[in-house]
Image: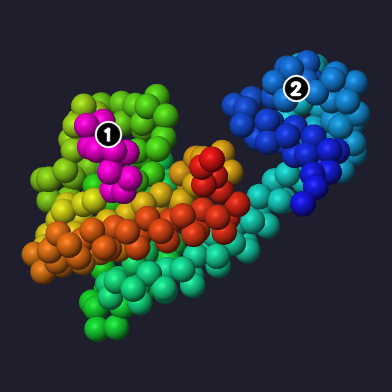
């Protein structure tokens, strides 16, 4: 499918503004996005008329406008991530025979937004709406492992940031970094009784179009009842489901 140049340029400008911590001059937008200055100003003027950007004349800078906020609000209302994830998670439950869930990052925590329960399996602590410390959960670890090191350090600046549930799990940045290195090498995250004693979990991250982790897909099972062969099979299904969801949300699946 052919790309429409003007549409691609508009999206590039909006994505650039969305990634900034504060309003920026038009010249820096032109430079960073790789557009001629005249084109940048024409695009900004058009976007400003529609309310997607706003010009701050005193500062000579540009920022996202109210229409951009309305788009984000619409996304939140429609909950497309949850809608796109429901069927793949149900399929994951059918293939593994265990409960599965989807969690999204929120600071140092993850919030569970979907739970698909396998027939005959008891409910988990990770019900929809529950928040848990990211460094203790498999979903949180899958997400944290793909964040820039500086962002992980900002989230966990000292030992007070490490909340434990059963006196197990990483309690320092050094320990967390070691764990996240293992997650990256393995390709998925695990958790062994750190959320609920006796239960183990495997999770993999869902990525956006920049390759940034936006959610974690997880399966939880009785730790002692599942051997290494079955665990490997669960991990394979979990990582495949994460790849399916990444494609569904238009995310980066690699070269």
Percent across and percent down for residue 2 are 80, 47
Q: Which residue is mark 1?
A: 181
- Residue at x 22%, y 32% (from the top left corner): 178
CA distance separating discs 2 and 1: 34 Å
- Residue at x 54%, y 40% (from the top left corner): 255
Span highlighted in magenta in the image: 176-189
**Marks 2 and 1 in Cβ contact (< 8 Å):** no
> Does the image show residue 139?
no
Judged from the image, the secondary structure of the residue bearing numbered disc 1 is helix
- Residue at x 58%, y 43% (from the top left corner): 209
Side (left or right) of 156 relative to 79: left
Percent across and percent down for residue 241 are 42, 61
Name the image quarter holding residue 202. Answer: bottom left
Q: Nearer the viewer, residue 138 or 1?
A: 1
Q: Nearer the viewer, residue 126 or 8?
A: 8
Up the image or down, 60 lies above or below 132; here it is above
Side (left or right) of 152 relative to 4: left
Around disc 1, counting alpha carbons within 10 Å, would you say few (fewer than 14), some (14 to 19), or many (20 or more)? few
In the rendering, which numbered label is found on residue 34? 2
């Amino acid at each position: 499918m052919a790309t429409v140049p003007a549409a691609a340029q508009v999206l590039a400008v909006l994505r650039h503004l969305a990634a900034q911590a504060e309003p920026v001059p038009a010249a820096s937008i032109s430079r960073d996005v790789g557009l001629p200055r005249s084109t940048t100003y024409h695009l900004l003027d058009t976007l400003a008329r529609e309310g997607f950007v706003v010009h701050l004349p005193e500062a000579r800078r540009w920022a996202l406008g109210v229409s951009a906020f309305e788009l984000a609000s619409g996304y939140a209302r429609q909950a497309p991530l949850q809608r796109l994830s429901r069927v793949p998670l149900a399929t994951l439950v059918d293939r593994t025979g265990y409960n599965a869930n989807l969690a999204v990052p929120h600071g140092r925590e993850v919030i569970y937004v979907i739970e698909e329960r396998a027939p005959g399996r008891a409910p988990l602590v990770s019900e929809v709406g529950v928040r848990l410390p990211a460094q203790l959960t498999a979903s949180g670890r899958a997400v944290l492992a793909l964040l820039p090191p500086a962002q992980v350090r900002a989230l966990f600046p000292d030992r007070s940031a490490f909340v434990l549930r059963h006196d197990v799990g990483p309690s320092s940045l050094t320990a967390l970094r070691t764990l996240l290195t293992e997650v990256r090498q393995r390709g998925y995250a695990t958790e062994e009784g750190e959320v609920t004693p006796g239960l183990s979990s495997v999770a993999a991250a869902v990525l956006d179009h920049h390759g940034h982790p936006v959610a974690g897909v997880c399966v939880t099972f009785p730790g002692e009842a599942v051997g290494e062969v079955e665990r490997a099979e669960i991990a394979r299904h979990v990582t495949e489901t994460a790849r399916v969801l990444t494609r569904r949300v238009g995310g980066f699946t690699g070269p």
